[in-house]
Amino acid sequence: DNPFGIAITPDGTKAYVANFDADTVSVINTATNAVVGSPITVGDLPFGIAICPAAVVPPTTPTDPAVVLKFTG
């Protein structure tokens, strides 16, 4: 499979591993080090992986330039 990239969920419970030669991503339960379900089919030769936030919380005031990214899943 040639694992090539890994990303850990913010809560630390899962690792997502890009399998370069298999064109898949495996989900690993970090507590047991076991693969969860079947690998997810993705595009050709995945080599990088990232977990992006699923929600954007707007600034609290009109002059506040900060935007807080919040993971929801």
Image (spheres, rainbow, N blue to C red):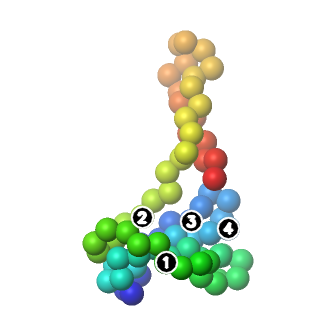
Q: Which mark is residue 49?
A: 2
CA gap, disc 3 and disc 4: 8 Å
Q: Name which of mark 2 and mark 4 comes first in the sequence.
A: 4
Q: Among all residues in the image, which is located at the extreme top?
A: 62
Q: Residue at x 60, y 15 (%)?
A: 61
Q: Residues within 10 Å of mark 3 (few under 14, many from 20)?
A: some
Disc 1 marks a residue whose amino acid type is: Pro
One can see residue 17 in this view: no
Q: Residues within 10 Å of mark 1 (few under 14, many from 20)?
A: some
Circle 3 is placed at which residue position?
8
Instruction: Kindly report the distance in space between the C-alpha atoms of the residues bearing marks 2 and 4.
Output: 16 Å
Percent from the top left, x then y, of residue 57? 59, 31
Crowd tier of the residue under label 4, counting other residues whose Cα lies within 10 Å: few below 14, some 14–19, many 20 or above: few
Question: What distance separates the C-alpha of mark 1 from that of mark 4?
Answer: 17 Å
Q: Earlier in the sequence, mark 2 or mark 1?
A: 1
Q: CA distance from mark 1 to mark 3?
A: 16 Å
Q: Are marks 2 and 4 in contact (CB under 8 Å)?
A: no
The secondary element bearing badge 4 is classed as loop
User: Earlier along the polypeptide chain: callout 1 or callout 3?
Assistant: 3
Image quadrant where residue 56 sits? top right
Amino acid residing under circle 4 = Thr
Q: Quadrant of the N terminus?
A: bottom left
Note whether 66 is above or below 61 in the view shown. Answer: below
Of tags 1 and 3, the one toward the viewer is 1
Is residue 56 depicted above or below 71 in this figure?
A: above
At label 3, which amino acid type do we have? Ile
